[in-house]
Image: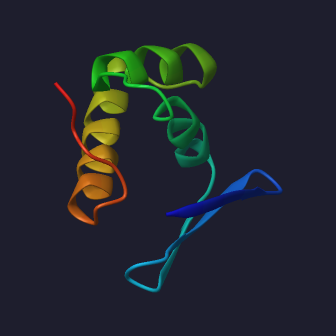
Amino acid sequence: MVAANIDGDVVMMGVDQGQYYGISGVGSRVWELLEEPISIDGITEVICREYETDSATCHDDMSKFVNELVKIDLIEVVE
């Protein structure tokens, strides 16, 4: 995976798959957080601190976003 930050958005290319992906807004911040192992609870804590959102909504949104990244093989779960 090759990734670049362009004007606050993350643009990625899966070299093996030949597919392009783009992440913008809060998703770009989450992508930064995912550079190091972090739990969904940890992501939620940071995003709630940095953006105006309630914890329950944020946790649900972060779970969906992270699970989608796992589903398309952009990240992997580590124990």
Question: Which residue sits at x=62%, y=20%?
Answer: 50
Q: Residue furthest left?
A: 79
Occupied quadrant, residue 6: bottom right
Q: Residue furthest front?
A: 16
Occupied quadrant, residue 40: top left
Residue 71 vertical placement versus 59 (above, below): below
> What x and y, as percent, mark residue 62?
34, 37
Quick one: 26 or 78, which is closer to the camera? 78
Residue 7 vertical placement versus 41 (above, below): below
Tell me the quadrant of the picture where the C terminus can be found: top left
Question: Which residue sits at x=60%, y=46%?
Answer: 28
Q: Residue furthest bottom?
A: 18
Quick one: 60 or 11, which is closer to the camera? 11
Question: Which residue sits at x=51%, y=17%?
Answer: 46
Tally of numbered discs: 0
> What x and y, as percent, mark residue 57?
32, 31
Quick one: 68 or 54, which is closer to the camera? 68
Colour mode?
rainbow
> What x and y, as percent, mark residue 65?
34, 49
Question: Which residue sits at x=46%, y=26%?
Answer: 36
**In this image, 38 relative to 64: left or right?**
right
**In this image, 43 relative to 29: left or right?**
left
**In this image, 35 relative to 71: left or right?**
right
> What x and y, as percent, mark residue 10?
64, 57
